[in-house]
Amino acid sequence: MKTNYLILHLVFLFVITGKPGTRAQDLSSSASGRDGIVAAGPSASVKAGLKILKQGGNAVDAASAVIFNLAVSDYGLFCIGGEVPFMFYDAGSKKVMVFNGMGGAPSDRKAIDWYYENGIPKNGIRSATVPSAVSTVLTALELKGTMSFEKVIAPTLSLLDSGKQAWHKNLALTLRKLVQTEKDTKGSREQKIRAARDRFYKGDIADELNTFYISSGAFLRKADLEAHKTSVEDAVSVNYRDLTVYKCNTWTQGPVLLQTLNLLGNFNLKSMGFFSSDYIHLTVEAMKLAYADRDKYYGDPSFVKVPLKQLLSDQYTSIRFPLIDMKKASHEICPGDPVNMIACNGPGEYWPGEKGTTTCVVVDKWGNVVAATPSANPEYGISESLGIAHNTRLSSLNTQKGHPNSIEPGKRPRITLTPTIVLKNRKPYLAMSVAGGDMQDQVTLQLLLDIAEFGMKPSEAIAAPRIYTHHIEDSFNPSPDPTIRAGKTAVLDIYDTGQSVIDDLANRGHIMNVVKGPIAHPIAIHTDQLTGISYAATQKGKRCGAVDDMK
């Protein structure tokens, strides 16, 4: 980072957030450059990605190195048996694709009956879905990368070899088995990577995992591993002003951001002023409407028919946004009916309970972009002999029969993990990833508006004050009773701003809660299309770096 650039940003931060009574969020690091940039978790993982970029790898190669490395450097927030929604913008085709990074529930019907009878545990091996991260990353590497698995896994193996935990050595042995399979397989780079992936899900590693599943009382089996595939999907998008915003489908909460942007498109936010009481009130009320629809309709689209086209339609938006009362905070949960075009369809079903998520965003010198959100909440179920820890994501399903997000054999939970890619004129503009459970899309929305509406750079947006509404369902409560899953109606967290704004919001009916810690942990990379320079910034424990700054 150049000194003059940092000084300019500090000056601007004071202008935006330095007024009396306002305290900025903690900025962890920032970077800029043209030849490739990485924002992720700990420094070791950022360095792993930068090394790959420096060696001529593209964004997928670098992101693969980062994500595998995060399973070690950010263990507890992510593990090798976790999950990772993975979005990729291809500079050649100018299209955004999604590698579905979520595994499903056990396929045994008796296991599903057990969950309905006993509940879904929040930790341990019976709370695990099929481990999907290895498949996701290797599928992306096979289809859109340029390097071998051996090359991208090298920084992770070095980190494991220097580690002191018993599982470090065991996981290194497991990963080296995949490297050996890649070497021994004849054929193209793609065929070699596919063979490595198959050893994990169909070969002797799967056999050993099956033995562990049986001995540990898990419901997963080798058949679940063999059946798992990483599907490649179209991203879902809406236009906001002159931007096109892309998200994953409704196996994540991602489209809730798109619904909120549709509602906000009917208002002039910029004229309200950054973090004014009108601006805060409007964004909160729009989010309440969008999240009510999330909690009523979203689920794995392979299992349930989600009316997504109608939810994102102009017609539905036109009957929903008049529900926003600029003088009064809603205390109701109000999902609509997008099929019959009813604005509010009565009470909905209804804080963030997530303890483990990290982040990864990469932009390469050719303009390819990856935005991914690796995650795995502890406490893990661990196969000690393989060094493979498993996720606890099954608790993001529920046991309310007939609900779009209820548990079924092989069904993927609707997860909060929700990376974002934004294009302007079909070229990269912004990529974001946020750790923070149900906070993720709320914070993503605010960062996007900070940058797009108020002209901030990522460092300024991440340091700016934020809000969080509890007026949503807890995505980590698998209870069959929607009233138990309900959040705190009308409660609004705010990160220390002027008392007059807090009083104004309280007078409108918001139940105000001033918090001292940061609201979620985002990373972002913004690309200036005039100069070609990408600007990255991170918060609390996350780091970023640019190839330009490497010696």
Image (cartoon, rainbow, N blue to C red):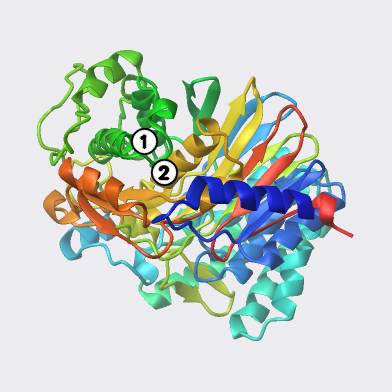
Q: Position of residue 186 (x, y in %)?
A: 83, 50
Question: Circle 2 sits in a helix, a strand or a loop, which is it?
Answer: helix
What residue is rendered at 50% in x and 30% in y?
A: 453
Q: Which mark is residue 321?
A: none
Q: Residues within 10 Å of mark 1 (few under 14, many from 20)?
A: many
Location of residue 273 with respect to 23 vertically, above or below: above
Q: Which mark is residue 256?
A: 1
Disc 1 + disc 2, Cβ < 8 Å: yes
Closer to us: 110 or 276 = 276
Closer to us: 289 or 509 = 509
Q: Amino acid at mark 2?
A: Asp
Residue on which the image places disc 2: 441
Location of the N terminus by quadrant is bottom right
Closer to us: 452 or 51 = 452
Location of the C terminus by quadrant is bottom right
Q: Position of residue 54 (x, y in %)?
A: 85, 52
Mark 2 or mark 1, which is nearer the start of the sequence? 1
Q: Position of residue 176 (x, y in %)?
A: 74, 68
Furthest-top residue in view? 315
Question: Circle 1 sits in a helix, a strand or a loop, which is it?
Answer: helix
Furthest-right residue in view? 551
Q: Amino acid at mark 1?
A: Val
Q: Is residue 234 visible?
A: no
Q: Residues within 10 Å of mark 2 (few under 14, many from 20)?
A: many
What residue is rendered at 61% in x and 85% in y?
A: 166
| CA–CA distance in space, label 1 to label 2 | 7 Å
Question: Would residue 188 appear left or right of 175 to someone viewing this image?
Answer: right
